[in-house]
Image (tube, helix red, strand yellow):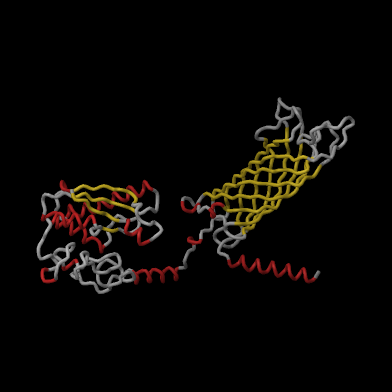
Amino acid sequence: MRKIAICVLLILGVISEAASQQPYNRWSIEVNAGFNKAMAPLTPGYFTPTLNVGHIDFGARYMITEKFGVKGDFGFGSFHELKTISPEFTTPYFRADIQGVANFGRILNFESFTKKFGLLGHAGAGFGKLSFEKTILNTQPEYQYNFIFGSTGLVKISNRIALTGDISMIYNGRQTYMFDGNQFNAPIQPQDPPSNPFVHAPGTWWTGTLGLNFYLGKKEAHADWYIAADNYATKEELASQINGIKDMLKDSDGDGVPDYLDKEPNTPTGARVNSTGMTMDSDGDGTPDHMDKCPFLPGPASTNGCPVEEVQEQVDFFRKAINDGYVNVYYAFDSSKPLGYSVSSASYVANFLKKNPGVSVEVMGYADELGPEDYNMKLSEKRAKAVYDVLVSSGVDASRLSYKGYGEDTSVDKSSADARQMARRASFSVK
């Protein structure tokens, strides 16, 4: 006996220590009241209201993790006849159950669209008692085992209280009498005087309640609402993180790419760079774009990167550059402000249009696949409009320009951060 007691104490100690390490509260108590409905069996001619007021239950819940827990609860009330339709009867009842709980709010990531509403599922087993009043049988109270299944909606009022709405089904096993207590729960009734046929069929009933959850504990949030990303930093931690971010955002060479992403931290001033800060040589001829007078046609350094003999018109060069995906303006996540390193693409287009007055261009905006589709459509149009405004402000006649948002670019791998960055862009189409 002493060994058992020591083991129990050790187990409780381990559980208590584990609970103290968690950043959320685990315990809550529940108070609910509402309706019941006895479905079957009922004596022929006896009926119950669809929503019979007269159920109350209380419970205590312990969340093992923010997704799963257990609870114990008990409920009581009484079933009554449907007035003017059914003969009169009154059947008080009591039930007590142990149940497992699943927090679907966390399992299904409700936080992606709401932090105010939650959903719990619960299921378990226990026992119940039916008493009978105003019956034609001299029935005694009877006990049954039961199974219970249900779901509970949550509305967060504060970190300590939540409004609840619950619907549960209770399945009674080995129920001797009808819910009204006027017949045995058996297909054939015994002859007078009635005697127990010892046939134990099941019974089914429902409850629907509204109530309150009271969250206990010293932590700020309960497991029902805890989201790991919501941890708050101390002032010191926050200051340290801000300083670290400032250091990360330094751009020593002024190419628009912060040092922590810049793979070429000493880029010459004015150089055209990609998203990693590397000097771009679009045609691969060894002359970087900012020094190459023909950045999309290979040529020797002696002719400033241009071919010795031009075999195509400049408009064709520009169209080829667009078709090959070299001329794009890129954006940060959820932003319509062009990233500094890619603004030179807009300048290139503006210079080209000034030199070729017969050419028109459409600016096409795109977004990645993160977020609602209608929002991304509007964001892509804002991105196209931002580049359109840059071109107009640089002196290009607005009549030669148009812009349109094309929404999400689904051609890239949305699970890749680098691919999503390539999708957040404005491209050009030569008319």
> Is 194 above or below relative to 248?
above
Task: State the quadrant of the N terminus.
Answer: bottom right
Residue 332 percent location from the top left of the image: 32, 59
Residue at the far bottom in the pictured view: 266
Left or right: 375 in relation to 60: left
Residue 184 percent location from the top left of the image: 81, 35
Quarter of image, res 66: bottom right
Q: Report the number of numbered marks.
A: 0
Residue 326 percent location from the top left of the image: 24, 59
Residue at the far right in the pictured view: 193
* Closest to the observer, 199 or 237: 199
Left or right: 415 in relation to 23: left
Q: Is residue 291 visible?
A: yes
Left or right: 55 in relation to 111: right
> Is 62 above or below relative to 280?
above
* Closest to the observer, 375 or 163: 375
Quarter of image, res 273: bottom left
Quarter of image, res 345: bottom left
Left or right: 130 in relation to 290: right
Residue 119 percent location from the top left of the image: 56, 49
> Is 38 above or below relative to 254?
above
User: In percent of the image, x 11 and y 49: which residue is there?
Assistant: 358
User: In percent of the image, x 18 and y 62: which residue is there?
Assistant: 296
Q: Is residue 328 visible?
A: no
